[in-house]
Image (tube, rainbow, N blue to C red):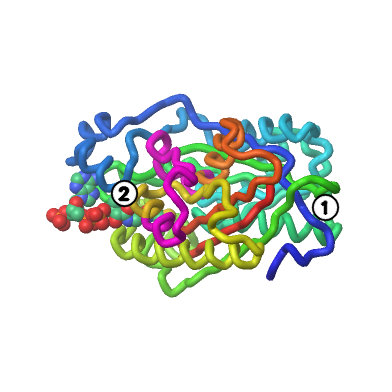
Amino acid sequence: MNESTSVTPVTISGTGSYVPEKILTNTDLEKIVDTSDEWIFSRTGIKERRIAAEGEFTSHMATKAAERALEQAGITAKEVDLIIVATITPDTLTPSTACYVQANLGASSAVAFDISAACSGFLYAMKLAKRLISDGAYQNALIIGAEKLSSFINWKDRNTCVLFGDGAGAAVLRKSEPGEGRILASETGSDGRHAGLLDIKGGGSACPITMANATDNLATLAMQGREVFKLAVTAMRQASEKVIERAGLTPDDITLVVPHQANLRIIDAISDRLAIPNEKVFVNLHKYGNTSAAAIAIALDEAHREGKFKRGDNIIMVAFGAGLTWAAAAIEW
Ligand code: COA
């Protein structure tokens, strides 16, 4: 559905992000698994990633990112009436991480829940919150992408452990006032037939972790990287094209693309196919690796704070992740 036809336009009034202090470099990883800085950097573009401290959970990172977004939006936590946390690494299976964040913030008027759409989660949350604000159900939504992937990595599997990192990003959404920007269009999609390409098999009801399987690394990420790569390029290109068209834009109208930060080769392939030059594509994966639902949220906040776009500029965000899921959004800032 084309958001530009919605009755009530919705804008992003603040962004925030947080990454843990601890840096794990490619060179550090050379001491853990049979890999090299050269292999990781040339295949992915990643140089280092952040790792949460012991006792630092997804909700803690989410809370810090949220506080920064609220400060920028100029509202207090009490004014937030909707909190959606997108994560695949919740503090606990239940309650939701969003409820912990609500308590941490003191956002006592909010309804809080999580969504699980992997790396596409932040844009799923954006579309949902946008619709709920448009419909008049809520006024100030806090959407957060937050992950502590380091807790779900098999640190002996070089196919995956070099790719991921921890962090959180957040945005505040509210009704757009005259003269302000707005979310122009968004696209979300899923294809569960490819669920097995990227998953965490254990720890859910299908495969509880027991004494018998505790050493099998079932509660860690497993991935068929090459297949995921191909599907990611196609899905992200198509989703981007859809939102560009629905927003009534052409690639020339776009100031900045904020893509999911998984692999520089995927990002380059998409910018090639969309005919958008590399200098209009925001990249920070060399610093953080793939932080799943947090990646676009962190990238948007960094790009915003670095002044990469200003009011009136058109931005495209596009993601792809486990499920499989994909999503894109076009925004006039
Ligand atoms: N260090 C050194 N060698 C490694 C390695 C590592 N960290 N990880 C894998 N290899 C090896 C493989 O074992 C394989 O060896 P083999 O040929 O002897 O079997 C070789 O490198 C090539 O593996 P391949 O899978 O073909 O590499 P690739 O060029 O496809 O790159 C990925 C692998 C994972 C970087 C790439 O497929 C990718 O990025 N896929 C998308 C993943 C992704 O973004 N997932 C998240 C989506 S949200």
Q: Is residue 13 above or below residue 232?
A: above
Task: Give the mark, 2 or 1, whose residue is nearer the N terminus.
Answer: 1
Q: Residues within 10 Å of mark 1 (few under 14, many from 20)?
A: many
267 relative position to 246: left or right: left
How far, Cα to Cα, is label 2 from label 1? 39 Å
Per the image, the residue denoted by label 2 is: 160
In the displayed orientation, state which residue is furthest to the bottom: 193
Question: What residue lies at 45% left-to-right and 55% top-to-bottom?
Answer: 203
Residue furthest front as drawn: 252
Q: Residue at 65%, 46% (x, y): give it.
A: 313
Position of residue 69 measured from the top left corner of the image (x, y, whole percent): 68, 35
Residue at mark 1: 138
Part of the protein shown in magenta: 269-294
Amino acid carrying label 1: it is Tyr
- Residue 206 locus on image (x, y percent): 45, 65
Inspect the magenta stretch and tell me whether residue 284 lies in it. Answer: yes
The kind of residue tagged 2 is Thr
| Residue 126 - label | none
Crowding around mark 2 (Cα neighbors within 10 Å: few <14, some 14 to 19, many 20+) is: some
Q: Quadrant of the C terminus?
A: top right
Q: Residue at x 31, y 58 (%)?
A: 225
- For label 2, the SS is helix
Q: Nearer the viewer, residue 233 or 217?
A: 233
Q: Residue at x 50, y 30 (%)?
A: 55
